[in-house]
Image (cartoon, helix red, strand yellow):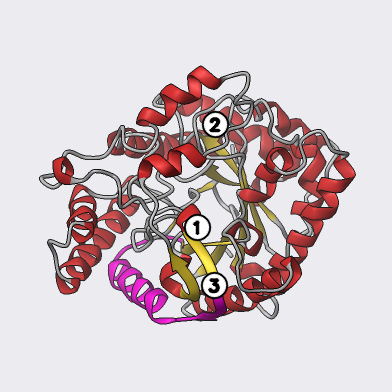
Amino acid sequence: MKRSSERILTSHVGSLVRTPELVEERIRAYLGETTEETSEETLRASVHDVVRHQSDVGIDVIDDGEYGKLNWIAYVGDRVRGFERIVMSAESLAGAAFWPEQERFGEFYRRYEQFETTQWLPDTPSLGRYTGNQMIDYRNLVCRSPLRYDPAPLQRDIENFKAALHGVEVSEAFMPVVAPGSIEIVPNEYYATPDEYLSALCEVLHEEYKQIVDAGFIVQVDDAILPAMYYYAFRGRPLAEYLSWAEKRIDAVNRALKGIPEDRVRYHICFGSQNIPHTTDPPLKDIISLVLKVRAQAYSIEACNPAHEHEWEIWNDVKLPDDKILVPGVISHATNVIEHPKLIAQRIIRFANLVGRENVIAGSDCGFSQGWNSPRVHSQIQWAKLEALVAGARLASDELWE
């Protein structure tokens, strides 16, 4: 994996806002108005566009925007046999949501759900005929038979990504995938015990991780559910109980990564992509020792969320292991305010002074669009933020290598 040996490199978490053409094609597919051939053509063209755009902006370590996925968890319904989709309306899915501190911020969440997933969808011809009843979410997946990995959908994404990278100058390329513990929230109706279910998830995801690395890419393992369960499942219970649960899920990541070189792996955690209060997130100091147990070379960690930005200080006491890389979020995915490059540089320099400049790659807190229909900001804001990231990394490099 490339390091910041001569200047601060830049990257992001992976999921980018879909192009209007790709959103239109998704909607038409749900309405039964398109063909598989047309969908594949639109996907290839959109991946080509997003790869070129990242390169033009100056991002060093890029991906395919996760354009081939429905969202960061529900995509497994296309790649893993044994999961079934059940019909749930958008209204049912919203009613099933349980937000942190809903008792305290209930009125906020009622308003938030009205626009949270659709406020930045592009105005496409089919949008007016799309009711949202075809929503794709992890909550309308269920495991009902033995899990078996189907490599074809991933191979399509690999081929599209490789084709888009042809003639593009970037330092490295990565592909994000979900962690076993983060898929575990998909209901299980087949395996006899939670441990059996988790083991099956490790086995199928190992095939996915290996296929990505064998194709020449870095694999990024996304594990946003690990911190989230601190509140959802262990609220009011001793911290030790949560840590015991979390350690088993960290072990599951390592089982799924068995045999894969550490220098081909990034591990990402965040505290939820939504623009919500974040008053119930676990402190990073409580989980960082577990995070660093993952057999990865790089750790992508949310770091500029206002509820967590102060946690850069933990690196005064926590030693980043030798030969590891920190990818702190120095731009937010969830606010429309575009960070000033000088602020970004200040954030980068803090980390560089604590863990070593060569061990820092500047990144984002989370993905800009967790699914095709869930952009957190408008695409114009997304690209402006990434441009600011590159400018801030350049300023930080000037100071760190003066």
Answer whether residue 97 is magenta in the image.
Answer: no
Q: Position of residue 30 (x, y in %)?
A: 23, 58
- The label shown at residue 85 is none
In the image, residue 216 above or below residue 220? below
Specify the segment rendered in magenta: 144-171
In the image, residue 200 above or below residue 331? below
Look at the numbered disc 3 and give the secondary structure of its residue.
strand
Question: What amino acid is found at the position of numbered circle 1 in the picture?
Answer: Ile
User: Which quarter of the picture shows residue 93?
Assistant: top left
User: Which quarter shows the N terminus?
Assistant: bottom right
Answer whether residue 157 is magenta in the image.
Answer: yes
Q: Position of residue 325 (x, y in %)?
A: 67, 54
In this view of the protein, can residue 15 be seen by the observer? Answer: yes
Residue annotated with mark 2? 345
Question: What amino acid is found at the position of numbered circle 2 in the picture?
Answer: Ala
Within 10 Å of disc 3 (Cα), the crowding (few <14, some 14-19, many 20+) is some
Question: What amino acid is found at the position of numbered circle 3 in the picture?
Answer: Arg
In the image, residue 116 above or below residue 52? above
Question: Which residue is at 55% across, 66% downward?
Answer: 219
- The label shown at residue 144 is 3
Marks 1/3: CA–CA distance: 17 Å
Residue annotated with mark 1? 73
In the image, residue 216 above or below residue 138? below
Within 10 Å of disc 2 (Cα), the crowding (few <14, some 14-19, many 20+) is many
Between residue 111 and residue 385, name the one nearer to us.
Answer: 111
